Image (tube, rainbow, N blue to C red):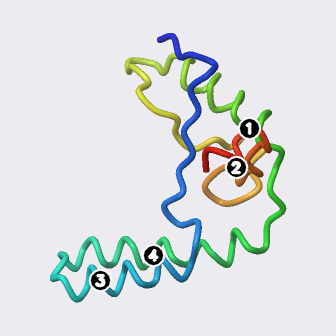
């Protein structure tokens, strides 16, 4: 798989606790299935973990993710980055500081 070094995707689903809390209330009020509600509630506990961590510099973590995505897995084709244990600073991988060059697009 070839991935352009110009392609960068940031997962910001839980970047703001107030927004995340409000979305959860909307989902519950909107009749979202309880299994999804439990999943989302479980993710909200990550705010404490993230708030206690010091973000890693973004560019090295981006390169680690890019390398992992391109590396083969026995018997499987890698289609997305999984858990990155190397250099992890939070339970599920690497919390990064987004490089300053992305300030205008976020």
Q: Which circle's residue, 4 or 1, is located before the other in the chain? A: 4
| Mark number, residue 26 | 3
- Separation (CA) of disc 3 from disc 4: 16 Å
- Kindly state the secondary structure of the residue where label 2 is placed: loop
Picture quarter containing residue 39?
bottom left
Distance from the alpha carbon under mark 2 to that under mark 4: 19 Å
The disc, 1 or 2, on the residue closer to the chain's N-terminal end is: 1
Q: Are marks 2 and 4 in contact (CB under 8 Å)?
A: no
Give the mark nearer the N terminus: 1 vs 3: 3
Instruction: Examine the image and state in which quarter residue 54 appears.
Output: bottom right
Residue matched to label 2: 94
- Residue 25 horizontal side relative to residue 1, left or right: left
Q: Which residue is mark 1?
A: 61
User: Residue at left 70%, top 68%?
Assistant: 50
Mark 2 residue crowding within 10 angstroms, few (<14) / some (14–19) / many (20+) = many
The secondary element bearing badge 1 is classed as helix
Discs 3/4, front = 3
Relative to 18, does residue 96 appear above or below in the rendering? above
Give the image location of residue 43, x and y in percent: 48, 71
């Amino acid at each position: 798989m070839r991935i352009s070094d110009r392609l960068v995707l940031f997962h910001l689903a839980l970047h703001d606790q107030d927004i995340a809390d409000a979305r959860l209330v909307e989902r519950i009020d909107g009749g979202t299935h309880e299994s999804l509600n439990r999943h989302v509630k479980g993710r909200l506990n990550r705010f404490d973990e993230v708030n206690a961590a010091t973000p890693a510099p973004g560019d090295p973590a981006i390169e680690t993710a890019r390398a992992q995505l391109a590396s083969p897995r026995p018997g499987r084709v890698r289609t997305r980055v999984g858990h990155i244990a190397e250099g992890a600073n939070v339970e599920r991988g690497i919390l990064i500081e987004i490089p300053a060059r992305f300030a205008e697009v976020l």
